[in-house]
């Protein structure tokens, strides 16, 4: 197997950023997308104007609308939103071999089933070599070649280390992990907690509140990861604490932006219509809450965000309910 031949499915902001990072690292990268105009822009002027205006992608990236050709590469990376993964998996199953490493960069739980991305991929692709890339990564900064680090999680440690090395460069470092569950839970819940932090910012309640939300949000993440069989220590790394620090403190985060608009009194539906890209935390709040309920895991902040988003619960009432919970030891 030539580990430097990579197909990436998804030409949004993060798919394009991954294509750039891996191409800079010396990999032969082919990027797939449905929009022919975007594909032509990437090939001809090395830009993705819709998602990443005025940023130059590595000139060696080849873009295509031919899904089959991308799936036939030695390594396939899936960079589409979480709720599209099952449908995509069923679509590409005919092109993927049993041993092809499948790497996914989405962060979330599947609506309806409450399943992790790796569980969905295992069902749709019947593939044993599934990996997850997750961590504190803004697409624009990766394309600007700012130093970035993330986690590369794969049960097969030897293969995972080899792939992480091939994908890494001086400005894009991937740290290996075998805890594929913990890494996914960290990435999914941080989107929900980032919405909560955005709401707090929009309400103007101060930095003390944000610090409390982040800290208690991490505690919720630990509880769910442990219940699902993940390693709590994983959440102190890039895919947990690192991702929380980035998304819960920066307006570059779509989830934080979305929450901030809610905190200012704007409706969820109108805010979503005006945003470019997917707010993963919006969907994950429902799926995570369902999975946690099935496992009898208490996630008060995630549940509060879910209530605000789907049941139109008053924000001030939700905050009051959180503050009125019985005080207990950390």
Image (tube, rainbow, N blue to C red):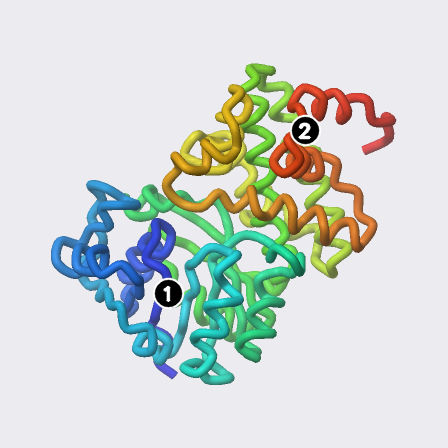
Decide: is 171 above or below 228.
above
Question: How far from the left and from the top, in percent, is residue 122?
Answer: 59, 73
Question: How far from the left and from the top, in percent, is residue 82?
Answer: 51, 56
User: Secondary structure beneath disc 1?
Assistant: strand
Question: How far from the left and from the top, in percent, is residue 243?
Answer: 53, 43
Question: How far from the left and from the top, in percent, is residue 295?
Answer: 80, 54
Going 55% across and 70% down the picture, which residue do you hit? Answer: 121
Cα gap from disc 2 to disc 1, whole angstroms: 37 Å
Query: Is any part of residue 260 visible from this angle?
Result: no
Among the two numbered marks 2 and 1 on one chain, the one whose residue lies closer to the N terminus:
1
Going 65% across and 61% down the picture, which residue do you hit? Answer: 115
Q: Which mark is residue 306?
A: none
Q: Which mark is residue 9?
A: 1
Pick whichever, 263 or 127, lies toward us. 263
> Which marked residue is nearer to the observer: mark 2 or mark 1?
2
Q: Is residue 170 left or right of residue 291?
A: left
How packed mark 2 is, by other alpha carbons closer than 10 Å (few <14, some 14-19, many 20 or more), is some
Query: Is any part of residue 325 visible from this angle?
Result: yes
Going 58% across and 42% down the picture, which residue do you hit? Answer: 190
Which residue, given by chain and number where applicable, does mark 2 sit on? 313
Q: What is the total number of numbered labels drawn onto the structure image?
A: 2
Quadrant of the rendering where the N terminus is positioned:
bottom left
Going 59% across and 46% down the picture, which residue do you hit? Answer: 240
């Amino acid at each position: 197997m030539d580990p430097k031949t990579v197909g990436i499915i998804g030409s949004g902001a993060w798919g394009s950023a991954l294509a750039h990072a891996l191409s800079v690292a010396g990999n032969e990268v082919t990027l797939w997308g449905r929009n022919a105009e975007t594909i032509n822009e990437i090939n001809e002027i090395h830009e993705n104007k819709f998602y990443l205006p005025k940023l130059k992608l590595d000139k060696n990236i080849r873009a295509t609308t031919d899904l089959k050709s991308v799936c036939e590469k030695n390594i396939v990376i899936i960079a589409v939103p979480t709720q599209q993964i099952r449908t995509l998996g069923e679509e590409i199953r005919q092109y993927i071999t049993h041993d092809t490493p499948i790497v996914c960069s989405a962060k979330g739980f599947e609506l309806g089933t409450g399943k992790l991305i790796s569980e969905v991929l295992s069902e749709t692709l019947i593939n044993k070599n599934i990996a997850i890339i997750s961590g504190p990564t803004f697409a624009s900064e990766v394309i600007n070649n700012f130093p970035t680090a993330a986690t590369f999680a794969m049960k097969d440690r030897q293969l995972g280390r080899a792939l992480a090395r091939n994908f890494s460069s001086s400005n894009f470092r991937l740290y290996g992990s075998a805890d594929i569950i913990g890494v996914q839970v960290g990435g999914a819940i941080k989107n929900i907690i980032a919405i909560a932090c955005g709401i707090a910012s929009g309400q103007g309640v101060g930095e003390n509140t944000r610090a409390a939300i982040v800290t208690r949000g991490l505690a919720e993440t630990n509880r769910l990861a442990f219940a699902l069989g993940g390693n709590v220590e994983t959440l102190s790394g890039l895919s947990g604490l690192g991702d929380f620090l980035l998304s819960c403190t920066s307006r570059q985060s779509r989830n934080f932006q979305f929450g901030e608009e809610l905190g200012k009194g704007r409706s969820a539906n109108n805010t979503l219509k005006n945003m470019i890209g997917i707010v993963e935390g919006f969907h994950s709040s429902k799926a995570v809450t369902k999975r946690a309920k099935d496992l009898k895991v208490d996630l008060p902040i995630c549940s509060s965000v879910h209530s605000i988003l789907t049941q139109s619960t008053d924000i001030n009432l939700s905050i009051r309910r959180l503050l009125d919970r019985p005080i207990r030891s950390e």
